[in-house]
Image (cartoon, rainbow, N blue to C red):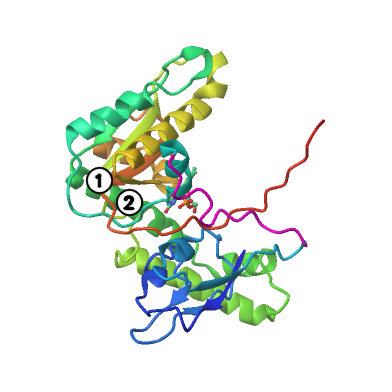
Amino acid sequence: MKITGFDEQKCTKCGLCSKDCMADLIDFQKGNLPVFNDPLEICIQCGHCIAVCPTNAIQYDLLAPDSEREYFSGIDHYSDSENGILKTLLNRRSVRFYQTKSVDKKVLEQIIDTMGRAPTASNKQNRNFYILSNPELVKRLEKKVSSFFLFLLKLSDQPVIHFFKTIFFRKRQFSFGDQYSKIKQNHQKMINKIGNQSYQFLFNAPAAIIITAPPKIPSNYHFFLKPDAYTCAFQGILTAESLGLGTCWIGFAEIAMEKNRKIKKAIGIPVHEQILAVFTLGYPAVSYHRAPPRGPVKIKWLD
Ligand SMILES: Cc1cc2nc3c(=O)[nH]c(=O)nc-3n(C[C@H](O)[C@H](O)[C@H](O)COP(=O)(O)O)c2cc1C
């Protein structure tokens, strides 16, 4: 799927598409039509711009660049379904804008309760749940995670690194010099956004749930730690969604906590417990109107 433009007749110039683009690829100025600007082709095709647009004004191409096969389009299929589970599955989006309203402990307990009922290998419960129900604690984690990535980005702001990135991610339509300067600029943009806190890794969420592996898990179970934790996290995400909350999986927090164990200590998690999954929760300050396209789905029927 590729964003190709904005329907002039339908677009109300509200700027929501630009606000919800996590890669910051939609330029918007009040009163003007948005502009999709992705010179490095880093759009991950999450389709949030499509889902968030109140008037369905985003234009896109459903064809994969290298195939004639149509992407699976989930748009408006089933999203008004009577079936609650189907509706939740199709309408769920990663929420990156939250109201300041805190999440009641009883609601969080309900979510943890269903997470504890998720299927697990051999019905083992080899995981611990840490609930950050105090927004101040989420802020502390945010500060630590952003310092970690800011340090890495500054460390890697080197001509030699931009040079190799240019070689690896070279797009045929740009000259080497052009591509190099775009990569360098993008790197600087990320440093600035994290440095001035305009990018938040945990999106000012009022709450978060962290799943860890307790120490001394039998070695034959290690293989199942991640799948069990992920199943459990997604059960929590769907429960939260069905209770009117929004969630977002935060892989960046998982990486930061595993690479710099002091971050765990700072929020009260024992350093020897492996972080398996992290997600934020809160009441959404954004609404989505349709399921964005996904794909391509490659299917082979084995009859
Ligand atoms: C393992 C995993 C890690 C993720 N990490 C992040 C993250 O660190 N930050 C973020 O904004 N979204 C993160 N996401 C959310 C994905 O970006 C999102 O699911 C994807 O873009 C599709 O959008 P949707 O969830 O709204 O359908 C993560 C998702 C998964 C499954």
> Closest to the observer: 86 or 98?
86
Residue under the point 44% across and 65% down: 21
Q: Is residue 273 visible?
A: no
The residue wearing badge 1 is 138
Q: Which residue is mark 2?
A: 202
Q: Is residue 280 visible?
A: yes
Of 295 and 21, which appears nearest the observer? 295
Q: 32 and 170: which one is in front?
A: 32
**In the rendered view, does 151 fall on the left or right side of 57?**
left
Verify whether residue 40 appears in magenta: no
- Image x and y of residue 163, in percent: 63, 69
Taking the image as shown, residue 188 lies to the left or right of residue 134, namely right
Question: As displayed, is residue 39 above or below residue 209?
Answer: below
Q: Quadrant of the C terminus?
A: top right
**x and y percent of residue 101 in the render?**
17, 50
Range shown magenta: 68-82
Question: Which residue in the rendered view is the most extreme toward the front?
Answer: 82
The prevailing secondary structure element of the residues shown in magenta is: loop
